Amino acid sequence: AKHVIIDCDPGQDDFINLMLVAAAPEVFEVAAITTVAGNVPLALTTHNARLACDWAGWRQVPVYAGCPAPLMRGLATAEHVHGATGVDGLPPATPGTPLIDTHAVPAMIDALRAAEAPMTLIATGPLTNIATALIMAPDIVDGIEQIVLMGGARSAGGNITPSAEFNMAVDPHAAARVAAAGIPLVIFGLDVTHQLRMTGPRRARLRAIGTPVATVIADMLDSTANRMTFAADDGPPLHDPCTALFLIAPSLFDLVDCHLAVETDSPVTYGHTAVDIAGATGRPVNARWATAIDDEAAFACIEQRLAGLAAG
Ligand code: BDR
Ligand code: CA
């Protein structure tokens, strides 16, 4: 199994991603979960990550709270998407999973330095923690095999501004640092996540699985579908789960090499991802960019994995 650190801001789709990871224990050995401010403030993303560990049936996975705000900008949140708690549809509870009393950034640095082999980082929130770790400890680059992340938009346009996807827009300076770090990146932006829609019939199929985890995921997706307006029959996109899906079944995706740069300064287009596939900038390849997903096969994979997840 791959040793992974999951850096996240749960977030309904972050939560679903964690359930997919839990449902593929032969693929993932989770070394740590680190939380960051994003969809909701840090206290809530941390609370929700601990609840996710309870639902996943994880007893040994340490959870560390990280940065409470982006590097340079004020925090922007997304309660309009995920609800006031960040995980609308999940019954309120007191987490059984403890919070470790160490900041996520030094915890991440220590874990990467101590690892026997380079680890994979899965990032499904703003990249503040990972950028801060790279600033504090540039040597960790050697301890990271790849960063598999959700963020950005090329042809899809933005979802938080006309030009930018949420994770990139919340902390563009962090994203720019991560892009420039020389670490292999695999990126799932809106171009591909908008192809994976949780339509009404798919939500019904998840509910029909009948387990507590599948039911709560169906409740979350129904809550988003009811709160937001989607084109008829579209339903909410599943953003963050593309990261776990890729590591479970890479052939679900089409990816192309690119040079990725992130706009930091423009008051209009901050967080925009400039994805150079054609080589127009002459800059070297620093990322693989996902362009397409076999969405039927991806949904079948999600359904099958969740059906096999007994925990929760
Ligand atoms: C991203 O923003 C968040 O709201 C989601 O959790 C996802 O990581 C999608 O733009
Ligand atoms: Ca997220």
Image: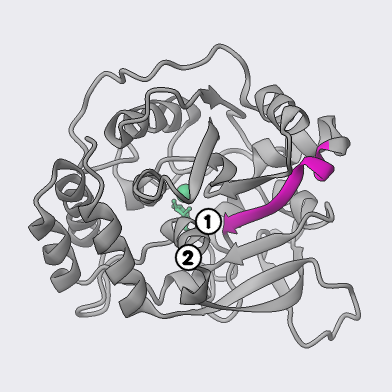
Q: Disc 1 marks which residue?
A: 166
Residue kind at label 2, given as amino acid type? Asn
Q: Give the alpha-carbon distance from disc 2 to disc 1, as whole Å.
A: 6 Å
Taking the spot 30% from the left edge, 28% from the top edge, the residue there is: 54
In the image, residue 190 lies in the stretch drawn in magenta: no
Q: Disc 2 marks which residue?
A: 159
Q: Which mark is residue 70?
A: none
Q: Specify whether tag 1 is near ligand 1 (CB below 8 Å).
A: yes
Q: Quadrant of residue 96?
A: top left
Of helix, strand and loop, which one carries label 2?
A: loop
From the image, which quarter does the C terminus lie in? top left
Q: Is residue 133 above or below residue 268?
A: above
Q: Specify whether tag 2 is near ligand 1 (CB below 8 Å).
A: yes
Left or right of 109? Residue 66 is: left
Q: Which residues are magenta?
A: 140-150
Taking the spot 37% from the left edge, 43% from the top edge, the residue there is: 22
Q: Considering depth in this image, is 108 or 161 the residue closer to the camera? A: 108
Taking the spot 20% from the left edge, 54% from the top edge, the residue there is: 307
Residue 164 position in % (x across, y down): 58, 64
Q: Residues within 10 Å of mark 1 (few under 14, many from 20)?
A: many
Residue kind at label 1, given as amino acid type? Phe
Residue 91 position in % (x across, y down): 18, 33
